[in-house]
Amino acid sequence: MKRRNYNKKTKINNNNDFYIDVMKPGNEYEECLEIAIDAFKNRNPCVKLLKPKEKELREMFIDGSKNGINNGLCLVCRDRNNNNDLAGFLFNQQLNVYNGHFKEPVKGKDKLYYMFKFAEYLYYKCALDINCDIGIGSVITGKTLHVSAGGTAKGYEGKGVGTMLRKYVLTHAEKHCFDRVVVEPANGATMHIWTNKCGPGYHLRTKEHFLPFKIDNHQPFAGIDKKEEMGIVEGIVNDDEFDLKNSVCCKYCNFGFLMCNCYLCCFREYKNENAANQDYVINNNTGVTGKDGAPKGISMSRNDKKND
């Protein structure tokens, strides 16, 4: 399967009532942060159990979106029949494991520490499983788009807004020269959308229930319903054999990254110099970054700042 050619603006995947657009910095971004905090605090079973402060949740969402909002990667769904009001959103950004993509919570201080450790455990489980096809090579080369959170504005629940946004993410990732998309759904409704409604491009790489998880001889999720779980879902932008090989990368790079988190020279940092222009045009996207065919103003460049 070859990469599709684009000659469209970012406002695509429309229906009669809603359309997808790039999230605007400022007030709209702040509104999305508030929706995310409310949704996680009141509807996410793990967060409800751990009871983090709103400040901690806010910091987590900012960490998971600050580069995305600055580079035109975060998405919103708008209501075309109601003054283009915000109906829903997704926080997306390059998964950059070398540059503080997420500030790791502090044990004994941050309530989300154990949730972070659980997700970390799932990723290591996938990476070390020779039968799991998760694209660790795509992560360490900077070609993975991470969806850190999503939400629906009040009054738009049950209208398919969340599904519409999530279905569009693979197209969005391809436009921006990413090979894969990853997300860690941690409630049943979100897991159902990603694994059953977003099409064959998405694959459930692993999932585990929260309750049995132990760390430091401690069972941090004691008291949670035994059915609650977190998974890792990965979307593959296209199934071309070369792209899959490129995403999987070499095992020696993977080993160096997993064992010592060392900086790898093949990582490319995503930059979108045209992010402020909401209507940039995508032309003939071949997926070759930084050259003719990539979206205008977009590049992935090496960051020579290595780990100490």
Image: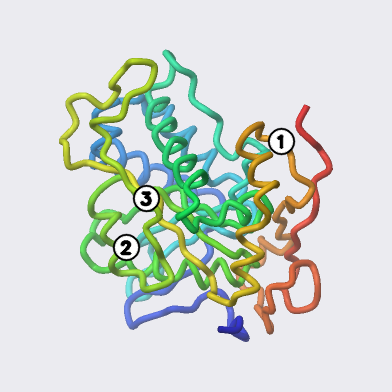
Question: What is the spatial separation of the Cα atoms under label 1 and label 3, in whole angstroms?
Answer: 25 Å
Identify the residue position indicated by label 1 in the image.
262
Kindly state the secondary structure of the residue where label 1 is placed.
loop
Residue 207 image position (x, y, % from top left)? 33, 47
Q: Does residue 287 sit above or below 207 in this rendering?
A: below
Q: Foreground mark, 2 or 3?
A: 3
**Looking at the rendered structure, which numbered label has been put on residue 78?**
none
Residue at x-position 36% and y-position 73%: 199
Nearer to us in this view, 18 or 119: 119
- CB under 8 Å between discs 1 and 2: no
Q: Does residue 240 sit above or below 228 in this rendering?
A: below
Mark 2: amino acid: Thr
- Residue 131 appears in the rendering: yes
Kindly state the secondary structure of the residue where label 3 is placed.
strand
Quadrant of the rendered structure where residue 177 is? bottom right
Quadrant of the rendered structure where residue 213 is? top left
**Label 2 Cα neighbours within 10 Å, binned few <14 / some 14-19 / many ≥20:** some
Quadrant of the rendered structure where residue 17 is? bottom left
Identify the residue position indicated by label 2 in the image.
195
Tell me the quarter of the image containing the C terminus.
top right
Of pointers 1 and 2, the one earlier in the residue sequence: 2
Q: Foreground mark, 1 or 2?
A: 1
**115 left or right of 99?**
left
Of pointers 1 and 3, the one earlier in the residue sequence: 3
- Residue 69 appears in the rendering: no
Question: What is the spatial separation of the Cα atoms under label 1 and label 2, in whole angstroms?
Answer: 32 Å
